[in-house]
Image (cartoon, rainbow, N blue to C red):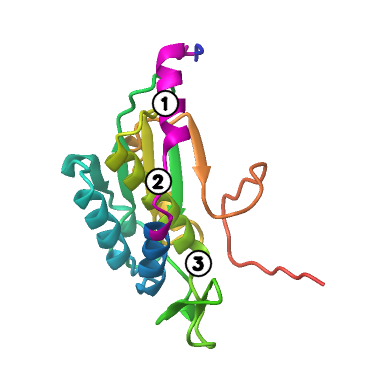
Amino acid sequence: MPRRRVSKEIFGRARNCVETLDPHLGRATDLLLDLLALPGVSGQEQEVSDYVSRRLLQSGAAANALKTDQAHRRTRIDGEAGNLVFRMGGKVRSVRRMLVAHMDTVPICRGSQPEIRKNKIVSRDPDTGLGADDRAGVAVLLSTALELLENKIPCPPLTFLWTVQEEIGLQGARHAALGMLGKPQLAFNFDGGSPEKLTIGATGGYRMQI
């Protein structure tokens, strides 16, 4: 596709706005704590989806900019909710970018009790996982969207995608309704890993550090 030129004036306004922005880091931490405490193993992500949607609407997101698909009706297991999509029109001329994170956690994180201890977020129950995979990513996307909405920051067109059933083989992403995404040209997945790595399926993972 042909390169799109961004005027110096528009770019300058966006840069100046970002440079003077004071992110609400306290709220970002609160968002993460709230999300970590929500149940949501693969197939049971409804509470997480509802939380994200509610916070977006409270910060001024248009109701028609929030959509969910029917991915959970096509996945290997029955699910409560499909993928959640929030699209923003941009004030900076550029290609659409997509930010992605998954809402589900693994079973050991059921009943997570997050708390801040010595400047770290830990699980109060040592037998329960924290669920930062990938509620940390969910919080990053949500915090970003709230900052953009509330501060009216000039940005390129953006698509926020929160997927379901990632932990059991990328089921939500596999069955996403692509027409809802707005044809993004760039995508950033907040779940760790190298940008050169492409995962198209997963049955499990083993990692060891010695």
Is 9 magenta? The answer is yes
Q: Does residue 175 appear in this view? A: no
The magenta segment is: 4-26
Q: CA distance from mark 1 to mark 2?
A: 15 Å
Mark earlier in primary sequence (3, 2): 3
Return the residue at label 3: 132
User: What's the residue type where badge 3 is placed?
Assistant: Ala
Q: Residue at x 20, y 44 (%)?
A: 60
User: Taken as a whole, is the magenta stretch helix, strand or loop?
Assistant: helix
- Which of these two is toward me, 39 or 28? 28
> Which label sits in the foreground, 3 or 2?
2
Q: Return the mark for residue 77.
A: none
Q: Is residue 15 above or below residue 38?
A: above
Q: Earlier in the sequence, mark 1 or mark 2?
A: 1
Mark 3 and mark 1 in contact (Cβ < 8 Å)? no
Q: Quick one: SS at disc 3?
A: helix
What amino acid is found at the position of numbered circle 2 in the picture? Thr
